[in-house]
Image: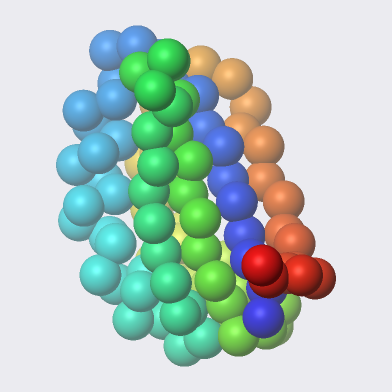
Amino acid sequence: MLIRYVRMTFQNDKTDEFLKIFNESKDKIKAMNGCEYLELMHDIHHPNIFMTHSHWKSEDDLNNYRDSELFKETWSKTKVLFAEKPLAFSVESLILV
């Protein structure tokens, strides 16, 4: 399983717009082949910083999502709201305690 994190810093006045976009697309993302988990997190000290946390069966499944029209449409609406370049990384769990 691949675990994906994407940290996004938005313009202060654009967070509501991002939340609207996320809420409109979250069920479609979760329905993508291979998506097993999707979570949106919010920085407790910086109200304009959010992070998505998702689990994918494989890297191919994540890449298929990233190549989809859903991703392209959602990302094109989201990226114009950024205050900083997003940080994305994929990991796999080694030890679960």
Would residue 50 appear left or right of 26 to someone viewing this image? right
Residue 81 x, y percent position in the rendering: 40, 26
In the image, what residue occupies the spot 58% across and 46% down?
6
What number of labels is visible?
0
Q: Farthest residue to the right: give it.
A: 94
For this rendering, which residue is in front, 41 or 25? 41
Residue at left offset 62%, top offset 60%: 4
**Which percent across, then down, holds residue 35?**
47, 79
Quarter of the image with the C terminus in it: bottom right
Q: Quadrant of residue 60?
A: bottom right
Asked if residue 19 shows in the view, the reply is yes
**Residue 87: where, in percent of width, then height?**
67, 37
Q: Is 10 above or below relative to 23?
A: above
> How are the colours assigned in the image?
rainbow
Q: Residue at x 51, y 55 (%)?
A: 53
Residue 2 as seen in the image, left or right of residue 55? right
Extreme front residue here?
Answer: 97
Classify 33 as above or below 20: below
**In this picture, residue 89 sits left or right of residue 48:** right
Looking at the image, which is closer to me, 54 or 73?
A: 54
Residue at 51% across, 16% down: 83
Q: Is residue 48 at least partly visible in the picture?
A: no
Task: Specify the quadrant that holds the N terminus.
Answer: bottom right
User: Where does the image place residue 37, in percent across and percent down from the top left?
Assistant: 43, 72
